[in-house]
Amino acid sequence: MVSFSTTRRPSRRQVLRASALGTAAFAAAPLLSACGGSSGGSSGRPVVRLWHWYNEQRDQWPRLVEEFQEAHPDIEVRNRLFGSPDEYLPALQAAVAAGDPPEVFAPHVLALEYGRNGITANLREELGESFVGEFFDSANGLFSDGDGQYAVGWMAQTFGVFYDPAALADAGTDVPETWDDLIEVARAVRDTGREPLVLSNNPGTSGLDFWLPLITQITDDPELVVRLDQQRDGASWESPEVVESLELVERLRQEEVFAANPNGIAGNQAEQMLYTGQAAMLFSGSWTPQGFAQEAPPEFVENYRVMRNPALRSGARHWTANQAGAAFAVSATSPHKDAALEFLRFTFEADRYSRIMNESNSMPCTKTAAERVEDPVMADMTSWLTDGDGAPHILMGRGSSDSAANGLAALLGGESSPDDVAADIQAGVERAAAR
């Protein structure tokens, strides 16, 4: 389930990229099947407890709850909006350990673990293919295991290259179509005294949003990253396709396409480098327009643009990272599960969900809502998903995220080679699986 000043909320990328310690601690919590411990409301009505930290819709939640209860006076909804994941995760962990998770909740990075342990409902089974089929495939894949789907996306996220048209004009260049074109653009931009492309890899998993879709660009197979993450069907991080994608990153580094020291650049600093004129381009996610609107100079906000990720060759697909930066799951054994499922159906009704996403300037996860995005920049980025260019980029397999992040950081820092990085990632994943 968006750079921020000290008062800005964490982006969905920062939220989902849990640290090794945080993820391990969260995963170590007992995974107990819900015991149905929730009680009814004071009037005896079924209660749907809604838990999340999705502050982007802070102004929309009260209206949604009011609309639902007007349409369903026999159901009570209790919306609990946490201030941050740091507040949210311990509370959810305690509820799951007690066997009484809320009826509808944000599953964070344990969506599949909760589904496999019977904590969350299989929404494909409960709500049908027509419901889950409305969501982007790349978002559904994040929460699917075999025939089971244990959450649906709330806010999508995709990535592109934000740029200052005036900076490219000063360099006498145009929007690059391919990575080769980008290298030429970067040389011209450097001659003007600006950094070409800012890539933030702080926190150290951020660069995976940039690198992992390159595997899909090379193979045109968006499922390969999923198979690598889950270590199934013989997929190996040492495969030639993975090495080739790392070789592309290494080439971009050697050609000085990236601003210096990506491992030391945080998201807020990266955004500032673009809107203060230090850099011409910025690789970032679909929460970035919200940040620019809050903090960048009005003239910049009026004039900046976003381009698709460059492709491997002219005419090839511009695969880019896309999955759900936020999601909702339903408790599998709550006595009020049916009421929770009805709340989910109501919330994702096309007109209502589209209104909520537009009012909060958020990227929707459904195909119908994607066609109704109003903000021009957000509409442009969302169109890449409706064109089918979304690729997996969030790793949930045991050891995958940390091993991949460490390897990529070493590559970006000039401390390792593509072959060694690929071997180190595979070894790290195998060590994690053996524990």
Image (cartoon, grey):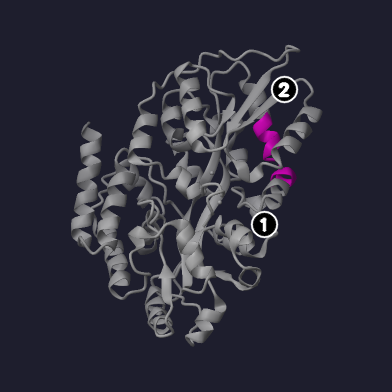
Q: Which residue range is magenta in the image?
A: 343-353
Q: Quadrant of the C terminus?
A: top left
What residue is at 41 percent from the left and 54 percent from the top? 222
Amino acid residing under circle 1: Glu
- The mark that comes first in sequence, 1 or 2, is 2
The residue indicated by pointer 2 is: 76
What is the spatial separation of the Cα atoms under label 1 and label 2, in whole angstroms?
32 Å
Q: Is residue 208 above or below residue 77?
A: below
Is residue 344 rendered magenta in the image? yes
What residue is at 43 percent from the left and 18 percent from the top? 32
How crowded is the residue under tag 1: few (<14 C-alpha within 10 Å), some, or many (20+)?
some
Q: Would residue 265 be visible to someone looking at this image?
A: yes
Q: Residue 168: where, in percent of width, then height?
A: 50, 81
Is residue 284 rendered magenta in the image? no
Q: Is residue 248 above or below residue 106?
A: below
Q: Residue 300: where, in percent of width, then height?
A: 61, 71
In the foreground, 199 or 336: 199
Amino acid residing under circle 2: Glu
Q: Would residue 232 be visible to someone looking at this image?
A: no
- Could you say which quadrant of the image residue 294 lies in? bottom right
How many numbered marks does the figure carry? 2
Q: Residue 273: where, in percent of width, then height?
A: 47, 68
- Could you say which quadrant of the image residue 16 lies in? top left
The residue indicated by pointer 1 is: 371
Helix or strand or loop: what does disc 2 sit on? strand
